[in-house]
Every structure is written in C-alpha cells, then in structure tokens.
Image: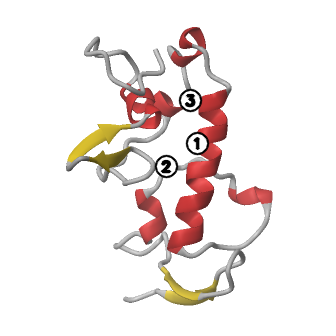
Amino acid sequence: MNTTKTKVCSGCESSFSCGDISAEEKCWCNDFPPIFNLADGGDCLCPVCFKEACEDKIDAYIETLTPEKAINNKAATLPKTEKLIEGIDYYIENEKYVFKSWFHLKRGSCCENGCRHCPY
C-alpha cells in the first residue's frame, strides 16, 4: 500500500513527496541522522531544506565540541544509517571524498590517520 503524501515545505513552500514511516518503504528523510525532535513543532521540510537544516544543526553541535567531549558524543549513540550523505558525512574535493567531522563522530573514535576533520 502506497502511503506517500504530497506536502508543502514549511521552509520554501515547494511541494514534495513525504512517505509514511509506518509503511514498508521508509520516507526519504529516514536516510538522514535522527537529530530533530518532532515534538518541537513545525511541519516537514522538502529534501533540500531538510538537508540544509541538518547541516546547520550538525555544524552548530560540532562547534561546541572539544576533543575531550567528542569521545562520548551524541552522534556515536544514534541509530546507524547505511547511506552516506554528501554535505553531512563528506564532500568531494579534487575527485576525492573528504570525510567531515560528523562522519568521524558517528564512528565513535579516532582512526589515527590524521584526518583533516577529525574531532578527536
């Protein structure tokens, strides 16, 4: 049973498809880190606005971290997502993947390879 709905983004007012999380196929937003509390109010955002909101929230969180605080961070305790998201987990520079702090935080420890964005 298809339970996809058409919604209007509360950020940019564009129309987009929103899946029902109770359906067999999860909504596209389930590929993103579960960092928003739905009880905070507001309605769904389109994929572009949602990604931007995630990036902003993650960047603000990372700015509060010191290497000591990174060791037991929130990202490592979140449910794991299979999909890496460009702009959140990595960016591409000179045709190479550069992993961002969020990716390293989700891993939960330093790999000791001298990564550019290592929060540890």
Please give the residue where the numbered disc 1 appears in the rendered image. 58
Please give the residue where the numbered disc 2 appears in the rendered image. 33
Please give the residue where the numbered disc 3 appears in the rendered image. 74
- How far apart, in angstroms, are the residues tagged by discs 2 and 3? 11 Å
From the viewer's perspective, is 76 left or right of 116?
A: right
Mark 3, residues whose alpha carbon is within 10 Å: few (<14), some, or many (≥20)? some
Which circle's residue, 2 or 3, is located before the other in the chain? 2
Image mark count = 3
Circle 2: residue type: Pro
**Which residue, as the protein is rendered here, is positioned at the far front?**
94
Find numbered disc 1 in the image and state the secondary structure of the residue it sits on. helix
From the viewer's perspective, is 117 left or right of 57?
A: left
Q: Position of residue 116 (x, y in %)?
A: 37, 25
Where 21 sits versus 1, above or below?
A: above
- As rendered, which of 30 and 14 lies closer to the eye? 14
Q: Position of residue 96 (x, y in %)?
A: 21, 44
Circle 3: residue type: Lys
- As rendered, which of 78 and 14 lies closer to the eye? 14
Pointers 1 and 2 in contact (C-beta within 8 Å): yes
Please state which of the two labelled residues, at mark 1 or mark 3, is closer to the viewer. Answer: 1
Q: Residue at x 38, y 17 (%)?
A: 109
Q: Residue at x 35, y 73 (%)?
A: 25
Where 4 sits versus 117, above or below?
A: below
Q: Residue at x 64, y 52 (%)?
A: 36
Mark 1, residues whose alpha carbon is within 10 Å: few (<14), some, or many (≥20)? some
- As rendered, which of 24 and 58 lies closer to the eye? 58
- How far apart, in angstroms, are the residues tagged by discs 1 and 3? 11 Å
Q: Residue at x 34, y 37 (%)?
A: 99
Circle 1: residue type: Ile
Find numbered disc 3 in the image and state the secondary structure of the residue it sits on. loop
From the viewer's perspective, is 52 left or right of 76?
A: right
Find numbered disc 2 in the image and state the secondary structure of the residue it sits on. loop
